[in-house]
Amino acid sequence: MLPIQTFDNRSGGNVTYKALAHPLAAEAMARLYSRLVPPVALCDPDGIAEALLSLHPDLPQPRSLFVQDVTSVGTTRAGMVAQPLTELPASGARSVLLAAFDAGRMAAHIAHRAPRGASVLTLDEARLPDALLTTHRRYLDKLNFATNFVFFRNENGLSTRLVSANYWATYGATGVRLWLRLFGADGGVLATWEQELPSGPGGYSIDSREVRERFGLDEFTGQLFIHAIGAAGHDVVKYALDTYASDNGASLSCTHDANAWPSDRYAGLPAPREDERVVLWVQNSHAVSIGGGELALDRMGAEKPVPLAQSIAPFATVAVDVAELLPDLRWPAQIELRAGRHVVRPRYEVRRAERVRIAHVNVERADLRPDPAIPSLPHTLGRGYLLPFPILPRKRFRSIVQPTPMAESQATLPVRLDMFDTEGRKVAERFLGCLPRGHDVAVDFDDVGIDEGHAELVYDFREGGSADGWLHALFRYEDRQSGHAAESSFGAHIFNTIMTYRGEPQSYSGPPPGLSTRLFLKLGDARRDSFGVLIYPASAPWHARSDTVLQLHSSDGKLIAEERIAIACSGSATVWPHRLFPAAVVRRAGGDGYVLVRDTTCRLFGYHGLMDAAGGFSLDHMFGF
């Protein structure tokens, strides 16, 4: 496992990691290393030596390590024993590398301690170009590293289209643009370009067919790196990604953004059925190779990981057939990816007959432990943590849910399903038990008898068990006529109560409770209509009905129409932009127009997708900003 700190749920992403892992930083580090004359003394005031040498291992030999903190003297970092900085003059180093950014003051402090004639360099030599920075006052400002990866392909009749909006404009940002770099399957750079975003909160898209044509590329499957410049408000690059059949075939999928922080493990990967092939797309997120055996797959709960023997080049993309590593595993068994912090949230592909569907796994938390307070949360929090998801119309669709462990310490999942019709009436519940980590329970709602509405996975401790609040599930939907399927997955939150607990109910910005809604719903195209399933979950009683406004925005961000709907508390509604708004108005919105779902009375949760006349559809959870 890479010894890097990527994300802390309490403080957010590690900006130093992003600064070191940026593709341009990798090129700059190579230039910096070429200026170092051995022996090299590495000064490590901020404790990043292991991360630095893991992501950029070619620091010239021989090396020695020096620290300021007296409690760190004698410890081992990156294979070197830390010496006190007072010993630097006697080190014999010809080059001193200060492992820090914004390091001018520190460099001045140690320059006179360097051996006679030694050069002193800092990581400021490997900064991104000024033109790519949002704020110049402090390099390690999170807004300088609003970045993410995208699974991007235009191959074998399948294309991808990223859609999003310039939501940074709603926080006052101006002149926002994207720096983009496309990597091919071998990790080589296929193209680098910039794209200006609308001046207001307009929509935008990046289509793999257009990129391929623009740069004269052959077919490719790889990853697109996005760096937003001029961001404000937050540093998260959010998007929805459609994978569609560019040859007019039957495949259609939608996935959420990639969650830009590499994790130790990922969960929520389903084993294949007898008639399916499940392919995990492994995309190296760093400029250093992944060695053979560093990644592994395991049946969830088995603790018998099977290593992937293949090595993966920097920024390369590799398709892994899970059956090659776990040949006897079948749905509803679950698979865990041991990723060693080498990759951001991967995609997986399910191939069945002539149809292909894409979905994503989720970050399995390593920092969580069971919370003994959750089984006895006060009544003011009502049912507490809820994981809402749609039950699509039973006449056409089959809906299936599978609870999925999503933290390394989760040994049990004590859960129940509460089921509601579209008007918020609770029509059924089912206790699933205190499930073990390696369970293979998947509930088919055909067996429950709900025609349409939604369900909520909640904790239920009647048979014991523990909980940590990070409750997740996989949702699978199948079209009874076409055989097409879609999958989504997400985690639980506390919804719509004025009382708070450990950051819940979450807010888009500011402290909890989050009691308002701002969701992005894309528009369809000539072949496919877009839709959204909006759910009004409530941990405790809240407003009887929502006051939800559906605002149609044009490609340049102008509000051109709006419609109001009211959703019952604990109810749901399916919305179709092409039915809500006149066709001429939707055309005015343009190809990158979108609907903003706004509500200042409650927090809605939603799922969105596309649907075509050939039985294809897609579904994944919506994002808010």
Image (cartoon, grey):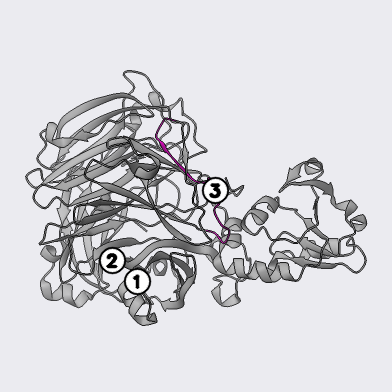
Measured along the vertical axis of the image, is residue 542 above or below residue 210? above
Q: Is the magenta stretch mostly helix, strand or loop?
A: loop
Task: Determine which quarter of the picture holds residue 256.
Answer: bottom left
Q: Is mark 2 on a helix, strand or loop?
A: loop
Could you tell which of marks 1 and 2 lies nearer the N-terminus?
2
Q: Which mark is residue 11?
A: 3
Contact check, label 1 and label 2, Cβ < 8 Å: yes
Task: Determine which quarter of the picture holds residue 329.
Answer: top left
Q: Residue at left 54%, top 48%? A: 11
In this picture, which residue range is highlighted in magenta? 286-302
- Residue that carries the numbered disc 1 in the rendered image: 219
Look at discs 3 and 2 and give the one toward the viewer. Answer: 2
Badge 3, how many Cα within 10 Å: few under 14, some, many 20+?
A: few
Amino acid residing under circle 3: Ser
Q: Residue furthest left?
A: 395
**In which quadrant will I find the N terminus?**
top right
Residue 449 drawn at (x, y percent): 10, 34
Amino acid residing under circle 2: Asn
Q: Residue at left 61%, top 62%? A: 140
- Residue that carries the numbered disc 2 in the rendered image: 156
Is there any visible trace of residue 602 in the rendered image?
Answer: no
Determine whether, in the image, residue 513 is placed left or right of residue 356: right
Amino acid residing under circle 1: Glu
Residue 61 drawn at (x, y percent): 78, 58
Is there any visible trace of residue 600 in the rendered image?
Answer: yes
Is 498 or 164 nearer to us in this picture?
164
